[in-house]
Image: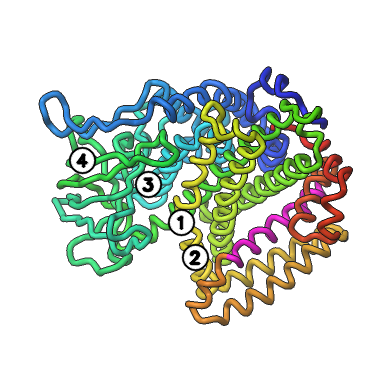
Amino acid sequence: MVLQQRSEIKMSLNFFEHDETLQTLLKESLSPNFYEYVHKELMKFGSLVANEIDDRAKHTDREGQPRLEKYDKYGDDSSRVWVNEGYKKTVEETYRTGIVGYVHKDIPELGHKGNYLYSFAQGYLLSQAEPGFHCPVTLTQATAYLLDHYASDEVKEKFLPHVCATGDMELFEGATFLTERQGGSDVGANVVKAVADGENYRLTGEKYFASNAGMAGVAMVLARMEGSAEGSRGLSLFAVPWRKDDGSSNGIKIRRLKDKLGVRAVPSGEVEFDGALAYVVGDPKKGFYYMMEALNLSRICNAIASLGIMRRAFNEALMYAEKRNAFGKKLTDFPMVQESLSTMKSKLEVELATTFDLIKLFDKVSSGNASEEETALNRLKIALVKKETAEQAIHFAHEAIEMHGGNGYIEDFVTPRLLRDAQVLTVWEGTANILGLELLRLVNKFSAHLLFIDEMTERLDSVSESSWKLRVFNAVEKLAKDLTIFASLDPDNQTIEAKELMRTMALLYEGVVALEWAALYGGRYDKLMEIFIETNWPERAIGEVKSSVKYFKDVLSHVSID
């Protein structure tokens, strides 16, 4: 499909309508009835996100950021967070879609639950306009996951229906409070205390980076019971309501809100617990394990937000390049611009397909139907995809700014916000170093590298023979040798090699998915997948590739804007 004009997109303003890859992913993975429902709902949501929610996001970022109202008119500490009316409307409209709720309860029109595939598709559309609000959605998803999987019937009944509200009852947004000043990524250093009070507990201490503070109806909090062991094994998980049943304070105060670089829509603060009533969730000895399970969910959400930013950055770059004239030509007539846009497009499509390939496995694992090997592979793939997508979100935002030139640096355009919002995604839910440590654990404890190579080889064997397949297969063989050496290294040397190996593993995973898509769908995917493989495993000399104007123009002619 030839490049469409900006005016054509302006007429539709729908992030879902033109996204052929997302539609293909959903259609191949859902039953016909479910897909029909999902397509209808995402058409509505795609329009809402591209119009009203996008307008509100700009207002929130520039003029309507959350504010802490520390004291009420009587001078008492109320620790209330003010958010603008537009943001409140976005909260209401988004949760009504079932982005959280329908993973855990039936969709009335269908008579069965949704799944994470549908939920993440919604999150991907939302993140193209408001990745800041996607953070509270992520936290609410994690809260629902923890309550549904591990809470007692009593605690689940008290909170889960509110966390999963779709307009049928009062909504409790969620939060997960882990980080303390002395801990950071070292969660085992946490010192928030939990003291027994009858059947429940009272929490005392502080959480230093608490996102959705003041907006959450219930927070999932790690704390240490009296007499518990040191380190992460001594942490228990608690559900902590922000207010008591009568609406009064539950002993939670906000010291201050963080002044963040980006994602300004979500209020992140320093929270103090002063005898806050808390309900233990699950086995008190497994609190850290439970939270790490929810962390895997949050890491996928992080990847989804990254993809949303990548998509918006690409679309903005493409629309601007098609509109802008320079030296007597449109930018899209210049080979170097064609190369940049083609490379971005192919990477975006492959990364989207790969992430949703992972989500299908996550759906299986989270439903309790996966083997031990599949569970280990799930953790490994999540770490690989989270790291790669987060880094690419920053790169795409940077590329979009460059395509705009000086305009890309001006806040009248969305591009500066995309870069600011993207930067947090490499930090939230685990930096590259923390993800590298995850690779070490999975290799050393579960031999996950062998499972990964076996799966990639098996999937490659199912793809028809081609020069593309040979290049990817050769890369898999080389990686297998490198991983064997990696597994034999001492831990210190493993940490040095981990991040670069993760990058190679992510690219190979994407390369296998790219070959599968080219084989299944041909046409535009042949071209998009070809340039992805050429970029990562070039067979031709770089000079020849870059001088082949027709090659990139041919690829670009198959791009349809999303």
Query: Decide: marks 2, 1 in contact (CB < 8 A)?
Result: yes
Q: Nearer the viewer, residue 152 or 466?
A: 466
Q: Which residues are magenta?
A: 500-520
Residue 451: quadrant of the picture = bottom right
**Mark with earlier residue (4, 1):** 4
Between circles 1 and 3, the one closer to the viewer is 1
> Which kind of residue does numbered mark 4 sit on?
Lys
Residue extending farthest front: 327
> Which kind of residue does numbered mark 2 sit on?
Glu
**Mark with earlier residue (1, 3):** 3
The residue carrying mark 2 is 438
Disc 4 and disc 1: Cα gap in Å? Answer: 26 Å
Disc 3 and disc 2: Cα gap in Å? Answer: 25 Å
Disc 3 and disc 4: Cα gap in Å? Answer: 24 Å
Judge from the rendering whether residue 505 lies leftward or rightward of residue 275; answer left or right: right
Judge from the rendering whether residue 500 lies leftward or rightward of residue 190; answer left or right: right
Q: Residue at x 44, y 56 (%)?
A: 293
> Which kind of residue does numbered mark 1 sit on?
Gly
Q: Residue at x 20, y 55 (%)?
A: 194
* Local SS, label 1: loop
Between circles 3 and 2, the one closer to the viewer is 2
The residue carrying mark 1 is 430
Image disc number at residue 540: none
Screen quadrant of the N terminus: top right
Horizontal and vertical percent for residue 421? 49, 40
* Local SS, label 2: helix
Query: Decide: marks 4, 2 in contact (CB < 8 A)?
Result: no
Horizontal and vertical percent for residue 541? 84, 60
